[in-house]
Image (cartoon, rainbow, N blue to C red):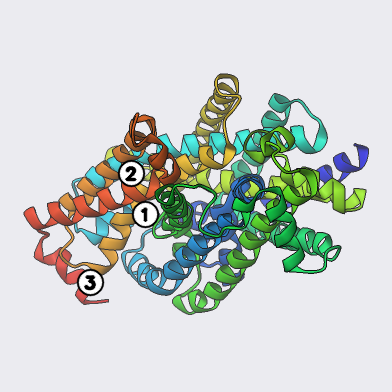
């Protein structure tokens, strides 16, 4: 226990040093939100991936590997495709336009893209981000409490509160620069930590065939890449639910603000390979850890959640204690916190920018100076974090049987379904209009809770929609509404001409 606390203290100390050094670079609003648009590709690539993965990767995906077996590798397929499409097709054009418009937030970009002064897109963006970022951050704080409880034996609520205080402190000090630099450090921890563990365990076996045989002996369904259910339609929906998680990389603001912050389009060409390799190796390693845990700790006919906890959230902790020396187990405490906090910090800065710059300044107080806005942003960050903490504690009390994998995906889906269709259409379709963008954002925003709380509870089709989850149908509805409404209410000539110039 003492060793783990020493490692944790060292980890937190590094974060605070990063925050302090970063704070010395905060001279303007663009520094606080996008690092002055002067950050290198290594930092951006690791920051984008660490933010996109979060505690969901180390706690959620490892658990899903234990529960679903080989079919969980569809998560890897979807994530790699989403990241590749984002970096190869969308990021260069997005970077060009945001530099041309001098945008430092996604709503900045949307206003300039549609040549509008109505502020409707800014208001909708601020509302959506305030709601779903609070949900998303609360799920990460929840994961922090679970991690402290699992690895350190600490009380869940004390662990959640401690993680909350740590991440809030260095954001408050250093803003976006602290976020990106800390993400690079934390991303490296995640990368090497996830790759090390399955390698150490697998050397004890004779190879992949032996692993497959032992997994099939526990449950033959676990070695079926097409799913664990007897119903082929249920398997189809489950595969789509896993694979379509990658849609969230096609325009989610917490990822795309990093494309604004990178130094140049040339750096995107280098960073794309870092991001893709990171995604492929870490996601595959996380699923593999879960599969190996299922072989090591369960028997034929045994309920895995009775061994690994709800959602198999204890998989990583059990595997590290089984396979690694004690000092490395202590380091994994920091690795889990790295995954969680790299997402919390990014989301809080994102929400702060939406509320302070895109809503408060741009609509009501354009006369405010950068120094004033930076201070306001810090305090808004604190308020958002406190609301997320309260929500996390409430969810833990009300729903002790929650699965962290799907709780985090709900917040991720809300942001993605609202913004991704709009970003895609705005980059590639000159016929996309402001009215169409508003329709897409509202329909995506409303579809997520509709599918979660109505369709998934439908008496006949609920189980299928539960497997499919909310992102794919919400994404498609938003995309469709953006297309139809833009045909009915076409854009201005000036808005059309913007894409012709790229």
- Disc on res. 23: none
Counting from the top left corner in percent of width and height, residue 355 is at 39, 39
Which tag, 3 or 1, sits closer to the chain's start? 1
Q: CA distance from mark 1 to mark 2?
A: 9 Å
Label 3: which secondary element? helix
The number of numbered discs placed on residues in the rendered structure image is 3
Q: Nearer the viewer, residue 45 or 467?
A: 467
Which tag, 1 or 2, sits closer to the chain's start? 1
Q: Name the quadrant of the C terminus.
A: bottom left
Counting from the top left corner in percent of width and height, residue 281 is at 64, 66
User: Is residue 465 found left or right of 205 in the rendered image?
Assistant: left
Residue wearing tag 3:
499
Residue wearing tag 1:
106
Asked whether the residues under the numbered discs 2 and 3 touch, taking CB atoms below 8 Å apart as contact, a structural biologist would say no
User: Is residue 172 found left or right of 34 in the rendered image?
Assistant: right
Label 1: which secondary element? helix
Q: Is residue 366 visible?
A: no
Q: Nearer the viewer, residue 47 or 378?
A: 47
Residue at x 55% of width, y 19% of height: 398
Counting from the top left corner in percent of width and height, residue 146 is at 69, 34
For label 1, the crowd category at 10 Å Cα-Cα, with few meaning under 14, some 14 to 19 and many 20 or more, is many
Q: CA distance from mark 2 to mark 3?
A: 22 Å
Residue at x 32% of width, y 46% of height: 474
Asked whether the residues under the numbered discs 1 and 2 touch, taking CB atoms below 8 Å apart as contact, a structural biologist would say yes
Which tag, 2 or 3, sits closer to the chain's start? 2
Q: Name the quadrant of the N terminus.
A: top right
For label 3, the crowd category at 10 Å Cα-Cα, with few meaning under 14, some 14 to 19 and many 20 or more, is some
- Disc on res. 125: 2
Q: Nearer the viewer, residue 424 or 110?
A: 424
User: Is residue 354 found left or right of 47 in the rendered image?
Assistant: left
């Amino acid at each position: 226990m003492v060793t783990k606390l020493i490692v944790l203290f060292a980890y937190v100390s590094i974060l605070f040093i990063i925050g302090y050094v970063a704070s010395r670079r905060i001279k303007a609003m663009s520094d606080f939100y996008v690092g002055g648009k002067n950050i290198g590709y290594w930092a951006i690539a690791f920051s984008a991936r660490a933010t996109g993965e979060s505690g969901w990767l180390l706690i959620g995906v490892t658990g899903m590997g234990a529960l679903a077996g080989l079919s969980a590798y569809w998560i890897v397929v979807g994530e790699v495709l989403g990241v590749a499409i984002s970096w190869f097709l969308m990021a260069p054009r997005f970077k060009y336009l945001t530099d041309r418009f001098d945008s430092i937030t996604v709503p900045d970009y949307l206003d300039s893209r549609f040549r509008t002064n109505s502020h409707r897109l800014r208001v909708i963006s601020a509302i959506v981000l305030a709601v779903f970022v609070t949900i998303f951050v609360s799920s990460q704080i929840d994961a922090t409490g679970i991690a402290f409880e699992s690895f350190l034996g600490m009380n869940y609520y004390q662990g959640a509160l401690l993680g909350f205080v740590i991440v809030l402190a260095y954001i408050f000090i250093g803003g976006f620069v602290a976020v990106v630099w800390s993400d690079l450090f934390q991303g490296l921890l995640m990368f090497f930590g996830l790759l090390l563990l399955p390698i150490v365990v697998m050397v004890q076996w004779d190879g992949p065939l032996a692993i497959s045989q032992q997994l099939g002996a526990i449950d033959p369904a676990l070695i079926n890449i097409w799913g664990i259910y007897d119903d082929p339609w249920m398997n189809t929906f489950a595969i789509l639910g896993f694979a379509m998680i990658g849609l969230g990389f096609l325009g989610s603001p917490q990822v795309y603000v990093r494309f604004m912050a990178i130094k140049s389009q040339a750096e995107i060409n280098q960073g794309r390979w870092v991001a893709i390799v990171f995604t492929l190796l870490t996601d595959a390693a996380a699923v593999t850890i879960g599969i190996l845990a299922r072989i090591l700790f369960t028997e034929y006919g045994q309920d895995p959640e009775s061994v690994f906890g709800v959602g198999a959230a204890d998989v990583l902790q059990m595997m590290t204690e089984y396979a690694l020396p004690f000092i490395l187990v202590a380091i994994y405490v920091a690795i889990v916190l790295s995954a969680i906090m790299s997402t919390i910090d990014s989301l809080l800065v994102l929400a702060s920018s939406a509320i302070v710059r895109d809503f408060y300044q741009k609509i009501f107080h354009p006369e405010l100076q950068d120094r004033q806005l930076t201070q306001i942003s810090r305090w808004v960050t604190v308020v958002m974090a406190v609301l997320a903490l309260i929500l996390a504690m409430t969810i833990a009390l009300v729903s002790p049987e929650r699965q962290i994998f799907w709780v985090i995906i709900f917040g991720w889906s809300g942001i993605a379904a609202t913004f991704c269709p709009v970003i895609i259409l705005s980059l590639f379709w000159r016929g996309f209009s402001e009215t169409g963008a508003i329709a897409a954002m509202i329909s995506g925003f409303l579809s997520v809770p509709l599918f979660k709380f109505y369709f998934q509870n439908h008496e006949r089709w609920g189980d299928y929609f539960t497997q499919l989850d909310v992102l794919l149908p919400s994404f498609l509805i938003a995309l469709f509404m953006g297309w139809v409404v833009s045909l009915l209410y076409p854009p201005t000539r000036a808005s059309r001409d913007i894409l012709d110039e790229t």
